[in-house]
């Protein structure tokens, strides 16, 4: 990666992390500037070096991160600002794509590949820590929701426990390798179920907030469908309210709405980027370790 692009990406991530934590927003001017700057600088270097691949790597990076960002956005995991930031980082970082074996190896050892893996790892740890802080901060409301959800999904929990007991009994009659595999499956099932209950409890108890309409910003997630005089205005299926919909709410003099405050994920991008820089500096290849684990 071109050195100046590392610096630009780092500065942008620091600014975006601050605004994301403080306002739950990442300015569009920052995200779109990253795309323009990344591709612009790469194009300039391509002309100077006489190597068009420098520019194409930025285009590839933008397109790959665009696909990932859209998937995460429409799955409701990230907001629009997080997704746009990832697109800008893709243009800056670039991705070495090609059709030869050497290019494939180069990709596996690239900064881009390291960064993707670290986003997954850092994002999971960061999200768990942030959710834990929210649960502790709102512990009374959290425990109430946690108990409610456990009772609500009691039948599901019983079915899982029966399945887990069956696997556990089977583990006594198989060889050591299959025994380890079955016990691992049991652990994953229990962790997945209780992690989901925990995350949903945090969401319902800690992330819903009623705010005045005049404080709504584009991209805020509306919890309930809002219909006025039989006309649908906005709702959760929108994956973020638009400026036009905010104007409609003001037009009909709606005073307050219930929104869902998501976890500010851009700081996890910053953490992943800094760790990627350190690993790249010491020439540590994380990709092999990751594939070894899975």
Image (cartoon, rainbow, N blue to C red):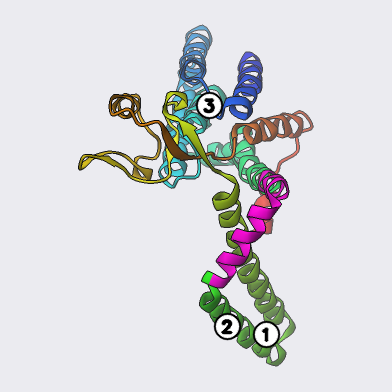
Q: Examine the image and state in which quarter residue 13 appears.
A: top right
Q: Earlier in the sequence, mark 3 or mark 2?
A: 3
Within 10 angstroms of label 1, few (less than 14), some, or many (20 or more) residues? Answer: some
Q: Which quarter of the rendering shows the N terminus?
A: top right
Q: Nearer the viewer, mark 3 or mark 1?
A: 3
Q: Which quarter of the rendering shows the C terminus?
A: bottom right
251 displayed left or right of 10: left
Instruction: Please tell me which residue is depicted at 58% across the width and 60% down the height of the picture.
Output: 196
Task: Tell me if residue 257 comes above or below residue 29 in the rendering.
Answer: below
Camera-nearest residue between 155 and 118: 155
Callout 1–callout 2 Cβ contact below 8 Å: no
- Tag 2 residue: 163
Q: Position of residue 216 (x, y in %)?
A: 44, 27
Q: Position of residue 204 (x, y in %)?
A: 54, 52
Is the magenta region chiefly helix, strand or loop? helix
Q: Position of residue 254 (x, y in %)?
A: 35, 31
Kind of element beneath mark 1? helix
Kind of element beneath mark 2? helix
Q: Nearer the viewer, mark 3 or mark 2?
A: 3
Q: Earlier in the sequence, mark 1 or mark 2?
A: 2
Camera-nearest residue between 146 and 25: 146
Instruction: Give how far apart the Cα atoms at labels 3 and 2 are.
Output: 43 Å
Callout 3–callout 2 Cβ contact below 8 Å: no
Q: Position of residue 58 (x, y in %)?
A: 49, 24
- Tag 3 residue: 25
The range drawn in magenta is 130-151
Kind of element beneath mark 3? loop
Camera-nearest residue between 208 and 99: 208
Query: Quick check: can you spot residue 98?
Result: no
Q: Could you say which disc has been placed on residue 168 in the image?
A: 1
């Amino acid at each position: 990666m071109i050195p100046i692009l590392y610096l630009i990406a780092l500065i942008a991530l620091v600014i975006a992390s601050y605004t994301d934590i403080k306002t739950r927003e990442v300015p569009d001017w920052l995200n779109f500037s990253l795309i323009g700057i990344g591709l612009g600088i790469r194009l300039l270097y391509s002309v100077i070096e006489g190597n068009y691949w420098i520019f194409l790597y930025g285009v590839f990076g933008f397109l790959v991160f665009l696909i990932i960002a859209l998937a995460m956005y429409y799955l409701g995991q990230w907001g629009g600002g997080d997704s746009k930031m990832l697109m800008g980082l893709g243009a800056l970082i670039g991705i070495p794509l090609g059709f030869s074996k050497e290019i494939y190896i180069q990709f596996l050892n690239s900064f881009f590949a390291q960064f993707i893996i670290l986003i997954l790892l850092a994002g999971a740890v960061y999200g768990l820590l942030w959710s834990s802080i929210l649960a502790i901060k709102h512990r009374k409301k959290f425990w109430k929701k946690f108990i409610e959800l456990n009772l609500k999904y009691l039948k599901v929990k019983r079915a899982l426990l029966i399945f887990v007991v069956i696997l556990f009994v089977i583990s006594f009659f198989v060889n050591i390798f299959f025994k380890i595999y079955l016990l691992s499956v049991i652990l994953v099932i229990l962790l997945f179920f209780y992690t989901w209950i925990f995350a949903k409890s945090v969401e319902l108890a800690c992330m819903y907030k009623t705010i005045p309409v005049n404080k709504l910003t584009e991209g805020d997630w509306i919890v309930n469908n809002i219909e006025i005089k039989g006309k649908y205005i906005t709702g959760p299926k929108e994956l973020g309210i638009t400026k036009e919909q905010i104007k409609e709410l003001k037009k009909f003099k709606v005073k307050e709405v219930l929104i869902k405050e998501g976890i500010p994920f851009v700081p996890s991008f910053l953490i992943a980027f800094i760790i990627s820089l350190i690993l790249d500096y010491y020439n540590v290849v994380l990709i092999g370790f990751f594939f070894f684990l899975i």
